[in-house]
Image: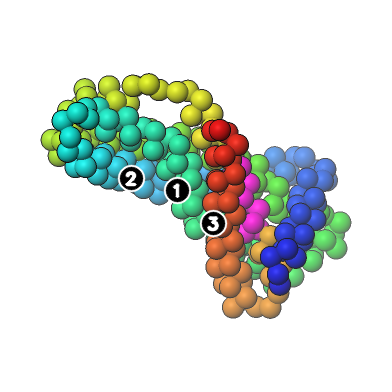
Amino acid sequence: MGLFTHIGRYVLWMSRVFKKPEKWRVYRKQIFFEIQSIGYASLGLVALVSLFMGAVLAIQLAYNIDSPLIPMYTVGFGVRDSLILEFSPTIISIILVGKVGSSIASEIGTMRVTDQIDALDIMGVNSTGYLVGPKMIAAVICNPFIAIISMILGMFGGYAAGILTGEVPGNTFIFGLQYAFQPYYITYALIKTAVFAVIITTVPAYFGYHTSGGALEVGRSSTVSVVYSIVVLLTFNLILTQMLLQ
């Protein structure tokens, strides 16, 4: 199936996600469940990656500052802006594609091949809205908070690495974190994260929903969904960067 065919099917399929739910009470219950599954369950991995990401950024910047004309607080400055502008919103979202996106594709794909989605349709339930809507809402709610936690832990990781390696004094690093801070960068990062949350949940769900066959096809849909999600995410990363930072 061609790329433009997928785009057309995806747009038509997404129109069903935004239809009015049959029972708001059921949707609310499902949203809270998905917040636990998508958001809370991802915190451990995000925390670990963010700490090491900040530490590596700090060490690499410190080791590459050879000129005495460049102050050492540049390390803190560089770590802060790198995390806020790109690493925490984009790299963490790519990691979540692998963790959350593949799980969603497998879950919905399994429901498709075992006729559970057909059963929902027969009962008059909007299966697309019921299965995808709560996941998308939960991700849009959770992912900005996850990004903020990633930024904080990444900066702490850079601070700890600077002190432990002796490359950057703690007060110098903190001065760099505070130097020429632009609050709009946080807004920019959170907008990107919210858009990425929609991609992380809906693109894998689309491939899972349109799975046909058996267990082998479910695995293939999961793999393809991760690849497409990353490509779409990076494309929107470029578009949003051009739009929001020009």
| Callout 1 touching callout 2 (CB < 8 Å) | yes
User: In this picture, is 159 found above or below 172?
Assistant: below
The 10 Å Cα crowd at callout 1, few under 14, some 14 to 19, many 20 or more, is: some
Callout 1 amino acid? Ile
Q: Of the residues under marks 1 and 2, which one precedes in the sequence?
A: 2
Answer with left or right where residue 87 lies relative to residue 14: left
User: In this picture, is 157 found above or below 178?
Assistant: below
Callout 2 amino acid? Met
Horizontal and vertical percent position of residue 55: 27, 42
**Which residue has dot 2 on it?**
53
Q: Give the alpha-carbon distance from disc 1 to disc 2, as whole Å.
A: 10 Å
Answer with left or right where residue 65 lies relative to residue 245: left
**Which residue has dot 1 on it?**
91
Q: Give the alpha-carbon distance from disc 2 to disc 3, as whole Å.
A: 19 Å
Q: What stretch is highlighted in magenta?
A: 195-205
Residue at left offset 69%, top offset 52%: 132
Residue at left offset 42%, top offset 43%: 87
The 10 Å Cα crowd at callout 3, few under 14, some 14 to 19, many 20 or more, is: many
Residue at left offset 37%, top offset 21%: 180
User: In this picture, is 103 found above or below 144?
Assistant: below
**Which residue has dot 3 on it?**
230
Horizontal and vertical percent position of residue 207: 66, 64
The image quarter containing residue 36 is top right
